[in-house]
Amino acid sequence: MAGFVDATGGGGWGPVATPSLLVSGRMEPRKVIGSVDTSEFVVAGAASAGFLIGLGSEGFVLPTVAALLVGGLIAAPLAAWLVRIVPAQLLGAAVGGLIVLTNARTIMRALDAPSGLRPVVYLAIVAAWAGALYLAVRLLRRTRRAPQPAPADAEERLPALDAA
């Protein structure tokens, strides 16, 4: 799905792939971010090469490219630090809600939604996002409070109580 969005919309690999992999809970956040960023680099490089071949150098503005590069250099270490301290479920809910909220404007413009409807949609998205964050925190607290099962070989390591 992320590849389709990236190819048809001119971007979206990271914003689509990252939350879906984070929410699945099968990978650590740092591995998700590293895998998505690495694959995104390859995808972006191939897309850029295709556009440069097709459009030539007139297709981009150098100051804009430089600003995006500087922003990426600033944001990457911050993101790496955050994924180490924020639990995966909470990170997935936060990132997913942010993506939906930031893309709502584009979707409403494409659908030619009336201007009076837009604040209602934004409020509904924020309310749903707050609910998702609440549920993620609640699940995280419940998971941390649950007793952890002892390792299978724990019985073998315990001394016999009736041996004395």
Image (spheres, helix red, strand yellow):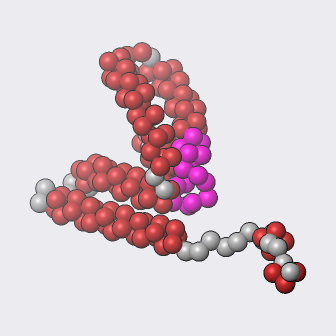
Quarter of the image for residue 157 reads: bottom right
- The residue sitting at the bottom extreme is 162
Between residues 35 and 5, which one lies in front from this camera angle? 35
Q: Residue at x 58, y 32 (%)?
A: 42
Q: Is residue 100 visible?
A: yes
Answer left or right for 80 relative to 25: left
- Specify whether 79 is left or right of 122: right
User: Vertical placement of 107 versus 66: above or below?
Assistant: below
As displayed, is residue 141 above or below residue 59?
below
Task: State the quadrant of the C terminus.
Answer: bottom right
- On the image, the x and y values in percent for residue 57 come to 42, 15
Q: Give the image location of residue 138, x and y in percent.
A: 42, 70
**Number of numbered callouts drawn:** 0
Q: Which residue is at a point 41% across and 25% down the rendered structure image? A: 69
- Residue 84, x across and y down, in percent: 51, 46
Residue 4: x %, y % from top left: 51, 47
Q: Is residue 6 visible?
A: no
Instruction: State the predominant SS element of the stretch in magenta.
Output: helix
Please name the residue shown 41% across and 66% down the image.
Answer: 137
- Along the line of sight, the residue nearer the viewer: 6 or 161: 161
Is 119 in the magenta?
no
Q: Which residues are magenta?
A: 21-35
